[in-house]
Amino acid sequence: MSKINYYIKRIFSPKIQTVNEEYLKWLSFANAGMLHPGNIFCFDHAIKNLPSASPIIEIGSFCGLSTNTITFLLKKYKKENKIFSSDKWLYEGYDSSGNLGNSNISHEEYRHFVKETFKRNVSFFSKNNLPYTIEVFSDEFFELWDRASELEDVFGRKIKMGGDISFAYIDGNHTYEFTKRDFLNTDKFLVQGGFILFDDTHSLSGFGCAEFMKEMEKDSKYELVMRNPNYLFKKK
C-alpha cells in the first residue's frame, strides 16, 4: 500500500485523537504534505512534555509540513528547542534519467522543486525558528551528529551538530532495516524522558517500519505512550 493511500484511508478514523488549532488548518491548505492528523496530536504531547531544551530532530522533511507544525507547537508551549532535519529529497521511485510518468518533467526537476518548496515553506511559516536542514541521508546525518561536525545547512548557515536530543520524528526510509538503524542512532543521543515518534507504523500501513514496532514494544528502555495510530515512545 502506498503512503498516500494509507494516509487517505486512515485520516478520517474516528479513533484518532487530533489537535484543534485554526492555524494548523490554514497551514495545511498552503503547505503540501502527507502529515497524518494523529501525528500532530503526538507532536503536541511530546513538545508539551519535552524533558529538556535539547534539539528536536526530524528524519525526512518533504515540503516542510511536519517541520512547520513542530515550530508552531514549540511556540504554543513557549519552548526554544532548535530543530535539525535531514532529507536528501530522493524519494521512492526516483529515476535520475526518467520523467514523471508520461510528463515532460524529469524526476530530477521534481526533486529540485520539492526541495525548493521545502525551503520556501519553512522560510515563511517557521521564520522565527528556522530549522537547520542538512541535505544528507539519515545514516550520514547521524555520523555527522556523532562527530559534532560543523557544516553548512541548506540555507547557507554554519551550524555545529551533536549533543543530546529531546525528541525525534522518524519519517525517512520506511523499510524495517532503515527504521531500526534510525532508532539505534537516535537512541545514542535521546535523553531520559525523551520522545520518539515513528511515522506510518500502524499495522495496516504495510511498511517494514510497522514490523519494527514489535521490537520496540519489547524494549525495556522504552515506554509506549500512545498509538494514534502511529507509535510514540518515551525513553525511561
Image (cartoon, rainbow, N blue to C red):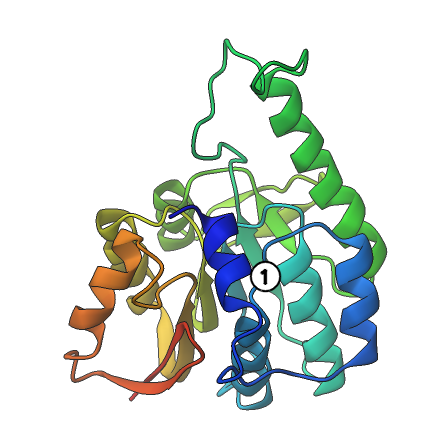
Residue 232 placement, left or right of 118: left
**Where, by quadrant of the figure, is residue 125 drawn?**
bottom right
Can residue 165 be seen here? The reply is yes
Front-most of residues 204 and 96:
204
In the image, taking residue 3 as reference, residue 215 lies left or right, namely left
Front-most of 193 and 217?
A: 217
The spot of residue 95 in percent (x, y) is: 47, 18
- Residue 31 at x, y = what percent? 75, 53
Question: Residue at the location (77% across, 81% down)?
Answer: 21
Amino acid type of the residue that numbered disc 1 sits on in the rendered structure: Leu
Residue 126 at least partly seen: no
Kind of element beneath mark 1: loop
Task: Using the image, determine if residue 117 lies above or below residue 231.
Answer: above
- How busy is the neighbourhood of tag 1: few (under 14 within 10 Å), some, or many (20 plus)? some
Please tell me which residue lies in front, 103 or 33: 103
Q: Which residue is mark 1?
A: 35
Place residue 89 in its image quadrant: top right
Where's the C terminus, which quadrant? bottom left
Looking at the image, residue 31 sits to the left or right of residue 59; the answer is right
The residue located at (48%, 35%) in the rendering is 91
Instruction: Indicate left or right for 217 with 122 as reference.
Output: left
Residue 200 percent location from the top left of the image: 41, 61
Residue depicted at x 59% and y 55%: 34
